[in-house]
Image (cartoon, helix red, strand yellow):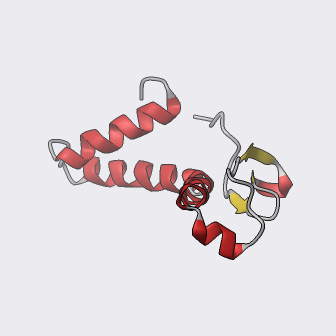
Amino acid sequence: MKTKHTPGPWNYDSSDNIVYGPNGTTVCGVHLKPKIVGVDDLEKSGRSLQTLANANLIAAAPELLAACEAAIRLIDRIGQREHPAFDRLFDAIKKVKREQL
């Protein structure tokens, strides 16, 4: 099944607040409020630290999806589909793909 999202890896560039995919493809922009001038200002703003953490989470999305897919295959292979982790992983993958697996 071909993915519809930009393939990973993705990286967050804090100099321009953009999450980039391979070959410099723009995945998304991140809006930091208040306007950040330097690291000291970033540390003073909890909201901006949260936004930075969100940007890093977004950038890790392709690897996280791949890890979830690998984990669900492993759980299935060892016959542990009734484990709560299986349903959580399945639901997360379904949410990303928005289609029946």
Place of residue 91 in the rendered image (x, y in percent of width and height, measured from the top left): 35, 35
Q: Residue lying furthest top in this view?
A: 99
Above or below, 18 against 95 in this view is below
The answer to whether residue 19 is left or right of residue 100 is right
The answer to whether residue 76 is left or right of residue 41 is left
**Residue 35 lies in what quarter of the image?**
bottom right
Q: Residue at x 69, y 74 (%)?
A: 39
Q: Residue at x 67, y 58 (%)?
A: 9
Location of the C terminus (image quadrant): top left
Place of residue 66 in the rendered image (x, y in percent of width and height, measured from the top left): 50, 52
Place of residue 12 in the rendered image (x, y in percent of width and height, measured from the top left): 70, 60
Counting the numbered discs, the total is 0
Above or below, 33 against 92 in this view is below
The answer to whether residue 90 is left or right of residue 53 is left
Q: Residue at x 74, y 46 (%)?
A: 29
**Residue 4 lies in what quarter of the image?**
top right
Place of residue 13 in the rendered image (x, y in percent of width and height, measured from the top left): 76, 62
